[in-house]
Amino acid sequence: MRKVVIFSCLLVAGLTGSQLLPALSADLLPGVRDAIRIVTTTLLGFLMIHVGYEFEIDRSRLRSYAVDYGVAATAAAFPWIFCSLYFLLVLMPPGASGSFDAWTQALLTGRFAAPTSAGILFSMLAAAGLSATWMFRKARILAIFDDLDTVLLMIPLKMMMVGVRWQLAVIILLMAVQMWIAWRYLRRLRAPVTWPWVLGYAITIAVVSEAIYAASKLIDDVVPIHIEVLLPAFVLGCVLVRPAGAEPHADDGREGHQEGPEDAREQLAWISTDRNSPNKLPRLVLMRQVEAEPRATTGLRPTAQVGRTPR
């Protein structure tokens, strides 16, 4: 419950900050906005790499994935449509529904105002210790498809605003190539998966995305090429090879398991810093697990502290 409260407070703080930042002076606002964008895209990439790393693709259930994609598409499109209609019919002057420019502005505003709660839902479920439930697994799949739909729905909106441009075709092609890579090379890339490396991957993806955006603005500042970090980060997580004997979902139902860190040493480091935890049983369980399989999980010999009964 403590994690749920923390996540909720962070969400409210983000919403509050988004309303206060526009009040900054014109000299400070661009720098603060760029810094926040880079930090948030890096953190988004870090999260999506872990989502892709834990994602399972059952190639025998393609029809089920098609149904899930349809559900996610409605979850992304319906809030957008309803918010756009509200802006158009309620907030805009009477008769605005007959103006193409009014429709464009309403759809653009509605795209950013419409809630997409699947990502928040499965984050809250994980924080509440419900990551072993069917609802969590389904919400995680829907969140991935929902994010993909959100990116795809921006393309026709851009076409309405600037017309058909070659940059939009490039974005669609890059998205298709990334999805093909995730399908074709699932669990093929051997690379470190500890959190410092994953953070480095996320920083690299964010920097490359910003570099492509800045370079494309030099060619055409009206329709730059903006590669959202969530898709390449997710694809990278899908192609990463899991260490021998690692199973990201084996401990989903165990109390005290921290979502994200794959290596047992990272789990142990996190638990050792949680000194205020009222339940010390997960510490003993994890320490005994590390002691039983020291080489398979951490590559280290057990120390004198591993397996010690907590006080």
Image: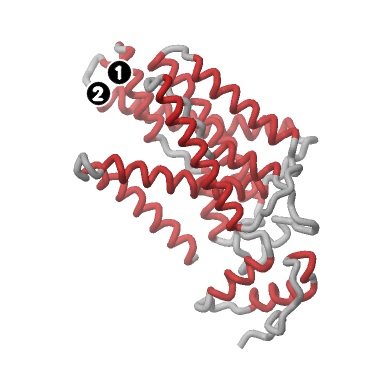
Residue 83 screen position, x and y as percent: 37, 30
What is the three-letter code of the residue carrying label 1?
Answer: Ala
Q: Residue at x 63, y 66 (%)?
A: 266
Which colour style is shown? Answer: secondary structure
Name the disc covering residue 258, or none. Answer: none
If the image is split into quadrants, where does the C terminus sit? bottom right
Residue 50 screen position, x and y as percent: 61, 50
Relative to 226, say whether 34 is above or below: below
Residue on which disc 1 sits: 102
Residue 43 screen position, x and y as percent: 49, 49
Q: Residue at x 74, y 32 (%)?
A: 62
Sequence-wise first label, 1 or 2: 2
Give the left or right position of residue 73, taking residue 15 as reference: right
For the residues bearing labels 1 and 2, Cβ distance under 8 angstroms: yes
Give the left or right position of residue 117, taking residue 302 as reference: left
- Characterize the local packing of mark 2: few (<14), some (14-19) or many (20 or more) Cα atoms within 10 angstroms: few
- Characterize the local packing of mark 1: few (<14), some (14-19) or many (20 or more) Cα atoms within 10 angstroms: some
Relative to 132, say whether 27 is above or below: above
Relative to 15, say whether 69 is above or below: above
Element marked by disc 1: helix
Find residue 106 and report its image quarter. top left
